[in-house]
Amino acid sequence: MNKKILMKGNEALAEAAIRAGLKGYFGYPITPQSEILEYLSRHLVGSNRVFLQAESEVAAINMVYGAAGCGERVMTSTSSPGFSLMQEGISYIACAELPCLLVNVVRGGPGLGTIQPSQGDYFQAVKGGGHGDYKLLVYAPNSVQEMADFVYKGFDAADKYRTPVLILTDGALGQMMEPVVFPDYNPDNHYTNHSAWATRGKSKNRDPNVITTLNLEADAMEKTNIHLQAKYKSIMENEVMFETIETEDADFLLIAFGLTSRIAHKALEMARENNIKVGLLRPQTLFPFPTQAIAELAENVQAILTIEMNAGQMVEDVRLAVNGRTPVYFYGRMGGVIPQPNEIYQKIKDVYHSSSKQISE
Amino acid sequence: MSISQEGIHCNYLNEMDLVWDRPDTFTDTTLHYCPGCGHSVINRLIMESVQELNIEEKTIGVAPVGCSVFAYHYMFIDMQEAAHGRASAVATGIKRILPDRIVFSYQGDGDLAAIGTAETIHTVNRGENILMLFINNGIYGMTGGQMSPTTLKGSITSTSPDGRDYNQHGYPLDITKIIAQMPGSAYVTRQSVDSANAVRKTKKAMMKSLKYQMDGGRGVCFIEIVSNCPSGWKMTPTESNEWLRNEIFNHYELGDIKQLPKLKTNEI
């Protein structure tokens, strides 16, 4: 058993990246993610490892593009306004099929907003975010342990699918300290040879490798899109991750991701103490979304309550999954406010009673 | 994309009579540039230099957005196409990850001196060991001839129909002079390809820059090539070259702007 270490979420993520074989980091300071940048500036050292503080998030994501195009494990991290600045570059990276890891430690918006934690970037993360039809594979940790674990998963998936992977977390998870255990992970055993497409200098017996996203012919560009969509379909079939808590006998289902899922879990315990059979489903991947699992649970519950730290974003995906099988309610706080367990419990009681009334009527 | 390593072969000539041929690093794909445009010459010159230095297996180029976006159709080496303005950031990512490779970026004036100004300045400021090629024709050619940051006073473009007016549009940006003042630039020169002599000088600057990078480098080598845009300027190729010599070079004076002491000797 590896040693348990007390660490900040941002630092655990950075340490995991080094252990996962990170070759290059390009980033720009922004609260509440700067610890990732600072940690890597101290620890990402040694031969063939690059730490570079860029002049902007725009430059950082394009450095990631260039470095990922060389076929090495590279990443960047930022927080919401910076993630907006990166969107153009991420669209290029997705189209050029460059594997890399992105991290968004979300803060409250819109605008300059607040440095308090938020989940307001859900749409931007899972619906593409930049221009054109593309998706990111999105992991949503809810603990410092998962802040580390999803780094390994993220790099492996990025290499496997040749696609940008995003860890969508928030300011609270980034800043909080918890025990974390780093798994045994030897990057050499997870090495993917990208030399077939990477630009590392054209060896004698092959044609040039060209990384481009341009295709003026509509038919050819559609083929690129069809190829990308097939990849996303494969990701949807193979990479869905979620956790369920006390859903077996539940007649009322909570759905929440990231930080909110921990508060929802507390509210679940309060409800269970008062004989309301509440269960919780926590998506660990936001794209691909656990559509099937939600659809199946929707058959057996009287109502679903989605809880988010935003105005109601994931709830749209929940409604698509539920497809009218059962009523879907929403409770959210915005602008960096973290909901309290008793607020959620109160909402559970309100919805539970109104939905049981509907059913008995 | 069809790329072939075959050069042009003339059946009616004996091989021993051959005095000119396409370099192996320059494909026989038909160039899409307008007749008389400097891009085709510059594309060829950088590939000639790469071949003569025998570095085609370790050179990675970064193609821009703009008229030369398809540079990778003509350059038979590994290449990345960058987003508009970001070529030097992409080149930085490549060079930092693979420091023993030779990396060059190729950008126009809209790309390098407008949308990519921050990346340009900071790439130079970090002293990245890359070659930056800056093709300045004072116009957005690809998008139909709009005013660019380097367009001269009075020039009529599709977005300055009454000619560039300093009060409305500001001044032509001489970014090369700014770059020459920065400690991160090693070699800064302004050249052209409007005559055979100018072509030779430009190639010499490219060879010098690439050799410098091969020797390890101590900063950005920056070559501005003041070039023409016959279509955008609404001129014949000959007129456009005369316009360069009679008007443009008076503002953008040709010649070396910055050399490191080491580069002044013949050792590189």
Image (cartoon, rainbow, N blue to C red):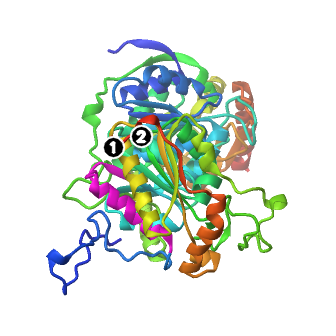
> Quadrant of residue A104 in the image?
top right
Front-most of B204 and A13? B204
Residue type highlighted by circle 2? Leu
The boundaries of the magenta stretch are B37-60
Which residue lies under the disc numbered 2?
A: B263
What is the quadrant of the N terminus of chain A in the image? Answer: top left
Classify mark 2: helix, strand or loop. Answer: helix
Name the spot of residue A224 as percent of width and height, x first.
43, 66
> Which label number is shown at residue B101?
1
Picture coordinates of residue A298 (x, y %)?
56, 48
**Residue shown at 28% from the left, 38% from the top:** A191
Q: Is residue A243 above or below residue A97?
A: above
Is A1 situated left or right of B32 in this image?
Answer: left
| Principal secondary structure, stretch drawn in magenta | helix
Q: Are marks 1 and 2 on the same chain?
A: yes
Q: Type of residue at label 1?
A: Arg
- The question of residue B38 being in magenta is answered with yes
